[in-house]
C-alpha cells in the first residue's frame, strides 16, 4: 500500500447531527477525551467561552445559548485519524449544516433516549440520505428515564425508513443504568459513573456467558440483559458493513455521554467501520481519493474570525492527493494559480500550519475573499466538485443604514456575509435597497449585530413584502428576455450575478410559472455553477 493509500484508509471524516439539547456538545467532548485530544472535559465549552469573550458579535450566540459557528476537530484513536466537523444544531443555521455535510464521509446521529427522533434530527437525516451518508446512531441520556430500547429502535425504523441494528445494549436505565454491552465485539465494559472527566480502562467481559458478568452486575440486571439481547438478536438484522456504508442500515449505540457510557464503543465502531474518504462527484469526472494529484473544495467560509483583521478562512475538504506546504493550486473559478503557504489544520486545542495534509482532511486557507463556497482547487486539471448547494431563503427583508451616507459600506458588508454563506443578498434590477435572504429569523439579528460590531454600521431590517426567492434557469433565451422585460421590478441578482425572481406571494410565483413555462424557478442553486444574468 502506498503512503497515500495508507493515509486515506486511516482517515475518518464525520459530523454529528442532532436536535438541540440531545447531547452533541457533550458527546464531542467525550470523543475528544477518548481520542486524547483534550485532558479535561469541558474544554470545548471553555475554549468557546474564551473565544466569545473576544468578539462582540457572538453576543447573540451567548445570549441564546446556541452554537452559531462550526469548527473542525482532529484527533487520533486506534490508529485512525478522525476529523470531526461540528455543525450548528439550531434550525436557523441549517444551510451551514447542509454544506458541512457535503464535506463528510459519515455522520453520527445523536438522539435523546427520552425523546427519540425530533424535528431537527429528521431534517438533518434527510440531508444525509440525499447523499447516502452512512449513519451511526447514539442514543444518549440512558442514565435518565428513557424510552424502551425496542420502542426507540422501531421509531427510528419507521420515522427514517432505515434498518437498525443494535451495536450496544443498555443495562438498565435511569438511576439503575449500569453500562452497555458491546454487541459487535461481544463484550462488556463497565465504567465508573463518578469519573466523568477521566477515562478509566473499564472492566472487560467476554461474551454474555462470562461468569464475571454475574459477579459484576446484580442478578436481575444480568438476567434482563441476556434476555433482551437474545430478543434483539432474534428480531433485528445483524450488523452488515455494506448495508451500513450504503446508508441503508444504522447501528445504534446506547449510552450516556456525560457518564462516558457507550462512547468508547461508538468510537471503536467509527474506527473500524465508518468509511474512509469516499470518491467525490465532480464535473466532468469522479475523483478517487488515492489519486496522486491534490484536489479539494471549499464548503465553508468564515469571515472576521479575528475582528481586528479582515481575514477569512476558507474551509477546504481535500478529496485526493497529498498536500504539501507551498503547493501551487489552481483556483478553477478564476483560473489563477495560488501558492498555498499558510493553510492551517485544526487540532482540538489549536490550529497549526499545515506542513502536509491528506484526503479527508480539512484545511483552513486564509484569504481576502478570493475563495468562495463551492470553489474547487486542483493541481491544474479543470474540474469542479458538484453538490455544494445554495438554498432559497425563506425570509426576505430590505436593509438600509441609519445614516444614508453609509449605503456603500453597508453593501460591502452584505457582500462579505453573502460570500461567507451567512446570508444571501439580492440586488434588485430597479430600486436602491438591497434585499437580504435568510433561512431563519434569528439570522437577521445575528447579521444586524455583526454589521454593527464588525463594520461599525447601524442598519435596519424591514419587511420587504416578499414571500419567496427563486433562481431562474432556462435554455429558452427568447422567453427569458421577455420575462425580464415584463418583470424587471421583481428581479434581482444574487452575489454571483445569477438572476433571481422575488415573488410577492404564492400567487405571484404561480403566475410567473404559468406564463413562462420554459423557465425553471429553482429553490436551490449549486454554488458557482454557470448562471443566467440579467444582462
Ligand atoms: P447539545 O450540544 O446537543 O445542545 O447538547 P449538550 O451536550 O449541550 O447537552 C444538553 C444537556 O444535556 C446538558 O445539560 C448536558 O449536560 C445534558 N447531557 C448530555 N449528555 C447527557 C447524559 O448522558 N445524561 C444526562 N442526564 N444529561 C446529559 P444542561 O443542563 O443544559 O447543561 P450543563 O449545565 O449540564 O452543561
Image: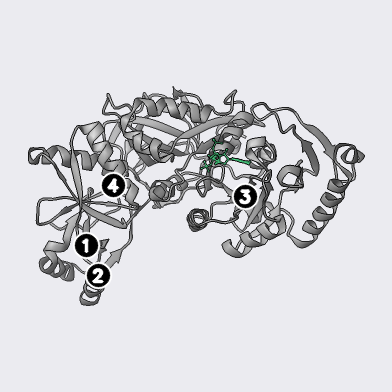
Callout 4 secondary element: helix
Q: Mark 2 sits on what residue?
A: 509
**Given this view, does label 4 or label 3 mark the residue nearer the observer?**
4
- The answer for how far apart the CA atoms under marks 4 and 1 are is 21 Å
Q: Is 29 placed above or below 210 here?
A: above
Residue lying furthest left in this view? 405
Q: Nearer the viewer, residue 155 or 5?
A: 155
Q: Position of residue 126 (x, y in %)?
A: 50, 58
User: Pointer 2 and pointer 3: residues touching (CB < 8 Å)?
Assistant: no
Apparent side of residue 150 relative to residue 299 in the rendered image (left or right): right
Looking at marks 4 and 3 on the same chain, the residue that comes earlier in the sequence is marked by 3
Looking at marks 2 and 1 on the same chain, the residue that comes earlier in the sequence is marked by 1
**Given this view, does label 4 or label 1 mark the residue nearer the observer?**
4
Callout 2 secondary element: helix
Apparent side of residue 239 relative to residue 298 in the rendered image (left or right): right
**Label 3 C-beta lies within 8 Å of the nearest ligand 1 atom:** no
Looking at marks 1 and 3 on the same chain, the residue that comes earlier in the sequence is marked by 3
- The answer for how far apart the CA atoms under marks 2 and 4 are is 24 Å
Q: Position of residue 360 (x, y in %)?
A: 51, 38
- The answer for how far apart the CA atoms under marks 2 and 1 are is 8 Å
The mark found on residue 137 in the picture is: 3
Q: Position of residue 224 (x, y in %)?
A: 83, 51
Callout 1 secondary element: strand
Q: Nearer the viewer, residue 116 or 101?
A: 116
User: Pointer 2 and pointer 1: residues touching (CB < 8 Å)?
Assistant: yes
Q: Is 64 placed above or below 477 here?
A: above
User: Pointer 4 and pointer 1: residues touching (CB < 8 Å)?
Assistant: no
Q: Mark 4 sits on what residue?
A: 444
Looking at marks 4 and 1 on the same chain, the residue that comes earlier in the sequence is marked by 4
Image point (81%, 59%), residue name: 231
Amino acid at each position: 500500500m502506498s503512503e497515500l493509500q495508507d493515509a486515506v484508509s486511516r482517515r475518518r471524516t464525520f459530523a454529528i447531527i442532532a436536535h438541540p439539547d440531545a447531547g452533541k456538545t457533550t458527546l464531542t467532548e467525550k470523543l475528544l477525551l477518548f481520542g486524547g485530544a483534550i485532558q479535561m472535559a469541558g474544554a470545548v465549552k471553555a475554549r468557546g467561552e474564551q473565544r466569545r469573550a473576544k468578539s462582540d458579535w457572538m453576543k447573540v450566540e451567548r445570549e441564546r445559548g446556541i452554537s452559531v459557528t462550526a469548527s473542525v476537530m482532529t484527533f487520533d484513536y486506534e490508529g485512525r485519524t478522525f476529523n470531526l466537523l461540528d455543525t450548528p444544531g439550531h434550525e436557523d443555521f441549517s444551510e451551514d449544516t447542509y454544506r458541512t455535510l457535503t464535506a463528510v464521509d459519515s455522520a453520527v446521529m445523536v438522539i435523546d433516549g427520552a425523546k427519540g427522533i425530533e424535528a431537527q434530527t429528521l431534517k438533518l437525516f434527510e440531508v444525509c440520505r440525499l447523499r447516502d451518508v452512512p449513519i451511526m446512531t447514539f442514543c444518549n441520556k440512558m442514565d435518565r428515564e428513557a424510552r424502551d430500547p425496542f420502542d426507540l429502535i422501531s421509531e427510528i425504523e419507521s420515522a427514517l425508513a432505515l434498518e437498525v441494528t443494535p451495536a450496544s445494549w443498555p443495562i438498565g436505565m435511569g438511576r439503575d443504568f449500569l453500562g452497555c454491552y458491546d454487541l459487535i465485539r461481544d463484550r462488556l465494559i463497565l465504567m465508573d459513573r463518578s469519573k466523568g472527566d477521566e477515562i478509566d480502562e473499564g472492566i472487560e467481559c467476554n461474551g454474555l456467558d462470562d461468569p464475571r458478568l454475574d459477579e459484576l452486575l446484580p442478578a436481575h440486571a444480568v438476567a434482563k440483559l441476556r434476555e433482551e439481547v437474545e430478543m434483539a438478536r432474534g428480531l433485528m438484522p445483524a450488523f452488515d458493513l455494506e448495508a451500513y456504508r450504503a446508508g441503508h442500515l444504522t447501528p445504534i449505540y446506547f449510552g450516556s455521554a456525560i457518564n462516558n457510557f457507550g462512547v468508547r464503543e461508538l468510537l471503536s465502531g467509527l474506527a473500524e467501520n465508518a468509511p474512509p474518504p469516499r470518491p467525490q462527484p465532480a464535473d466532468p469526472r469522479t475523483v478517487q481519493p488515492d489519486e496522486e494529484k491534490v484536489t479539494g473544495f471549499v464548503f465553508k467560509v468564515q469571515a472576521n474570525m479575528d475582528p481586528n483583521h479582515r481575514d477569512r478562512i476558507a474551509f477546504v475538504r481535500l478529496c485526493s492527493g497529498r498536500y504539501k506546504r507551498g503547493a501551487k493550486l489552481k483556483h478553477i473559478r478564476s483560473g489563477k494559480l495560488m501558492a498555498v503557504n499558510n493553510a492551517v489544520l485544526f487540532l482540538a486545542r489549536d490550529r497549526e500550519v499545515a506542513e502536509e495534509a491528506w484526503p479527508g482532511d480539512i484545511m483552513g486557507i486564509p484569504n481576502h475573499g478570493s475563495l468562495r463556497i463551492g470553489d474547487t482547487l486542483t493541481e491544474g486539471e479543470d474540474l469542479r466538485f458538484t453538490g455544494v448547494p445554495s438554498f432559497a431563503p425563506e425570509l426576505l427583508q430590505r436593509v438600509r443604514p441609519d445614516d444614508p451616507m453609509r449605503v456603500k459600506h453597508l453593501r460591502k458588508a452584505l457582500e462579505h456575509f453573502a460570500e461567507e454563506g451567512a446570508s444571501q443578498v439580492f440586488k434588485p434590477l430597479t430600486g436602491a435597497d438591497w434585499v437580504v435572504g435568510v433561512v431563519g429569523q434569528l439570522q437577521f439579528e445575528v447579521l444586524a449585530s455583526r454589521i454593527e460590531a464588525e463594520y461599525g454600521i447601524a442598519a435596519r431590517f424591514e419587511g420587504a413584502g416578499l414571500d419567496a426567492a427563486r433562481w431562474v434557469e432556462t435554455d429558452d433565451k427568447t422567453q427569458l428576455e421577455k420575462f425580464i422585460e415584463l418583470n424587471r421590478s421583481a428581479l434581482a441578482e444574487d452575489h454571483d450575478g445569477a438572476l433571481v425572481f422575488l415573488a410577492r406571494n404564492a400567487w405571484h410565483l404561480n403566475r410567473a410559472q404559468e406564463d413562462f413555462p420554459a423557465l425553471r424557478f429553482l429553490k436551490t442553486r449549486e454554488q458557482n455553477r454557470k448562471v443566467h444574468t440579467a444582462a
